[in-house]
């Protein structure tokens, strides 16, 4: 069984790419507000929360299975391409994954957009499952944000 891998998901949303991307840039505020069942809060420790080098701690909501927090560092940020990449550098996730890097991109499509999320990981051991739950969590998150933006 491989200890390294890659997972991805594409979520079609009705929100236009610019509007959806703006919510991703403001995720420290938007995620806990819109997805309070998923996020307790997002604390920015260094930087502005979305530029390269920024560090933040994501605290997940009560009842979150397995992972309670993740400390993330922004590795790449491209406003023009609506793309951000981050690595998990601390928190509960590090018990399960030696490395975990995710990339999120918002791609215009018609009147809406496609949110593409890719993660590359190295498990701490062969017993650790692939992060399918994290991928599904991300997809659910994007759908909730889209619904919120369409009501705003």
Image (cartoon, helix red, strand yellow):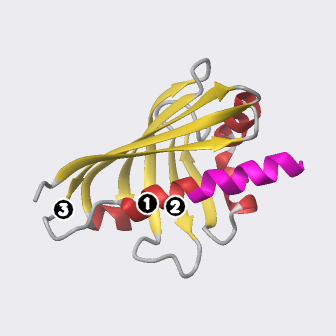
Q: Quadrant of the N terminus?
A: bottom left
In x, y percent, where is residue 146? 73, 48
Disc 2, SS? helix
32 in the magenta segment: no
SS assignment at label 3: loop
Q: Residues within 10 Å of mark 3 (few under 14, many from 20)?
A: some
Q: Is residue 60 left or right of residue 5?
A: right
Real-space Cα distance between discs 1 and 3? Answer: 16 Å
Badge 2: how crowded within 10 Å, few (<14), some, or many (20+)? few
| 116 or 102: nearer the viewer | 116
* Front: mark 1 or 3: 1
Taking the spot 54% from the left edge, 66% from the top edge, the residue there is: 59
Instruction: Write the start and end of the magenta stretch as one range.
Output: 140-152
Q: Which mark is residue 134?
A: 1
**From what the image shows, is residue 82 above or below residue 116?**
above
Predominant SS of the magenta segment: helix
Find the residue positioned furthest to the left. 1
Circles 3 and 2: CB atoms closer than 8 Å:
no
The quadrant in which residue 43 appears is: bottom right
Residue at the location (59% across, 73% down)?
61
Q: CA distance from mark 2 to mark 1?
A: 5 Å
Q: Would you name the residue on which mark 3 appears? A: 124
**Of pointers 3 and 2, the one earlier in the residue sequence:** 3
Distance in Å between CA atoms under marks 3 and 2: 21 Å
Where does residue 21 sit, x and y in percent of width and height?
A: 67, 34
Q: Residue furthest bottom?
A: 63
Query: Looking at the image, is 60 positioned above or below residue 83?
Result: below
Q: Are dots 2 and 1 in contact, CB under 8 Å?
A: yes
Identify the disc placed on residue 57: none
Q: Is residue 65 above or below residue 94?
A: below
Task: Please name the residue that numbered disc 2 is placed on.
Answer: 137
Q: Nearer the viewer, mark 3 or mark 2?
A: 2
């Amino acid at each position: 069984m491989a200890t390294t891998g890659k997972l991805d998901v594409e979520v079609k949303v009705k929100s236009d790419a610019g509007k959806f991307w703006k919510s991703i840039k403001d995720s420290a505020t938007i995620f806990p507000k819109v997805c309070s069942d998923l996020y307790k809060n997002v604390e920015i420790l260094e930087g502005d929360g979305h530029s390269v080098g920024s560090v933040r701690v994501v605290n997940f909501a009560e009842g979150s299975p397995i992972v309670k927090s993740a400390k993330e560092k922004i590795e790449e940020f491209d406003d023009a391409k609506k793309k951000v990449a981050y690595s998990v550098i601390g928190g509960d996730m590090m018990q399960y994954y030696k490395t975990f890097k995710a990339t999120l991109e918002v791609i215009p499509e018609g009147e809406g957009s496609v949110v593409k999320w890719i993660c590359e990981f190295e498990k701490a051991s062969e017993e650790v499952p692939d992060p399918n739950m994290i991928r599904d969590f991300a997809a659910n998150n994007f759908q909730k944000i889209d619904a919120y933006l369409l009501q705003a």
